[in-house]
Amino acid sequence: MRIANMGLIGCGGIARHSHLPTVEELSRRRALRLVAVCDIVEQSAREIGEKYNVPYYTDPDKMLEREKEVDFVDICTGDFTHHSLGKMAAESGKHVIVEKPMAVTLPCCDVMIDACRKAGVHFEVAENYFRMPTDRLIKRLIQSGVMGDVMRVYMVDPAGPSLPTHSGLCIDMGVHRMSQLRTYAGSEPRRVVGVTKRFVPGEGKEEEVAKAGRTFEDWGHAIVDFENGSVGIFECSAVGEKAGYRQVVGTKGTFRDNVWGGGLSLRASVGGKMADVPIDRKTKEIDGKDVLQSMVVKTEPETIWENPFKGYVLDDWRVGIAEELMSIANAAVSGADPEYGIGGRRDVEMCVALYESSLKGMAPVNLPITSITSYEQMVHEAYEGVFGHSPTEA
């Protein structure tokens, strides 16, 4: 099977520190090929184009028109441009993968979904967290019955005070955590109760707000009621110390992770008694780097996750990035459905419900959302004030 050709739109931070280094390693192993890049800032486009020896553009229309061999487009731009660029790529006959959040509102998500369906192209969301090694292992433990029935899932985001955001902390990072809550619960949400706040600086200090880069909430909390009866608890904060925590509580076991990428702990029933269960990471040196080969949990029988990229020089973070990119790359050349697809819309919907609940004094918001919310109307009005047209007219 031939390898897929990729075009990139957006040469900023997420592309530079996550997507492009991963693409470089995938290309080195002949898994896919980068053929063109685009950014409205010419210097950024030129830097990346010259670094990776590919044509660069400042106009996505021109890139899509001229680069006929592009199979899929990787969109790594600001959140508010995702739906318009996704639609543009689809209408050019290119498959689409878009960074999270999928879009800033559900109607914007639907602009992109409808365009892809009409054009007959595949769509994927660059949601990397549920694809990372530890998350894959947790899901395997749940599916194998080691954890029993999942009762509660806690996700405290490690954002910290320096996190930049295009669309609001609780959707920017929230979609990651809502995806993980759904993954671990193994169910879809039926209602959300939430609250958001901006603690510092306070109202009336807009100059300080702008200086601090905080034009949105700096803290949010949500409780999610799932269809199978499990409960998800989410919190995200840019106030105070950077900290992260997750816990999955089942009827037969509990999984904890105090710090992302380390401190894994599993207590489960062993021989009828609760006990700590060892988790081993097996690595191999490749090109001077320790590369994860597998994760082994000493259950009975053992629970094993094998790294599908164990021959690639990719750390845990970039394994998740590689999984998302290869999901759309394989779809582009084989016709198979991408792994996540419009699952990213469900994550946006949960975040919209969090904002809407907060606006309504923490009133529960039932899912699915069937009409535009007051929160989304506010976002659309702000968008129109900047761009001069409704976002759904992209």
Image (cartoon, rainbow, N blue to C red):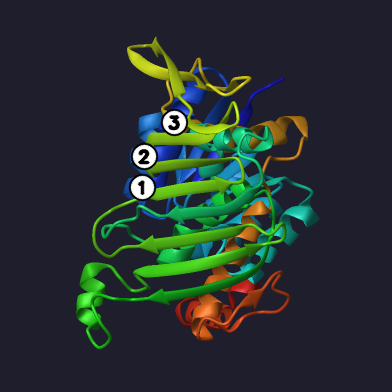
Taking the view exactly as shown, the residue that stands out farthest to the bottom is 204
Is 106 or 227 nearer to us in this picture?
Answer: 227
Which residue matches tag 1? 13
The residue that appears at 59% across and 26% down in the rendered structure is 271
Q: Which type of secondary structure does the marked residue at label 3 adopt?
A: helix
Q: Residues within 10 Å of mark 1 (few under 14, many from 20)?
A: few
Q: Amino acid at mark 1?
A: Gly
Q: Amino acid at mark 2?
A: His
Discs 1, 3 touching: Cβ within 8 Å: no
Q: Residues within 10 Å of mark 2 (few under 14, many from 20)?
A: few
Determine the image quadrant of residue 47.
Answer: top left
Q: Quadrant of the C terminus?
A: bottom right
Q: Position of residue 188 (x, y in %)?
A: 69, 57
Mark nearer the N terminus (1 vs 3): 1
Mark 2–mark 3 Cα distance, whole angstroms, equals 14 Å
The residue that appears at 48% across and 28% down in the rendered structure is 277
Discs 1, 2 touching: Cβ within 8 Å: yes
Q: Position of residue 40 (x, y in %)?
A: 42, 55
Is 144 or 323 nearer to us in this picture?
Answer: 144
Q: Quadrant of the N terminus?
A: top right
Q: From what the image shows, is residue 321 above or below residue 342?
A: above
Which residue matches tag 3? 316
Q: From what the image shows, is residue 184 above or below residue 29?
A: below
Q: Position of residue 323 (x, y in %)?
A: 57, 33
Q: Amino acid at mark 3?
A: Asp
Q: Position of residue 6 (x, y in %)?
A: 57, 36
Which residue matches tag 2? 17
Q: Which type of secondary structure does the marked residue at label 2 adopt?
A: helix
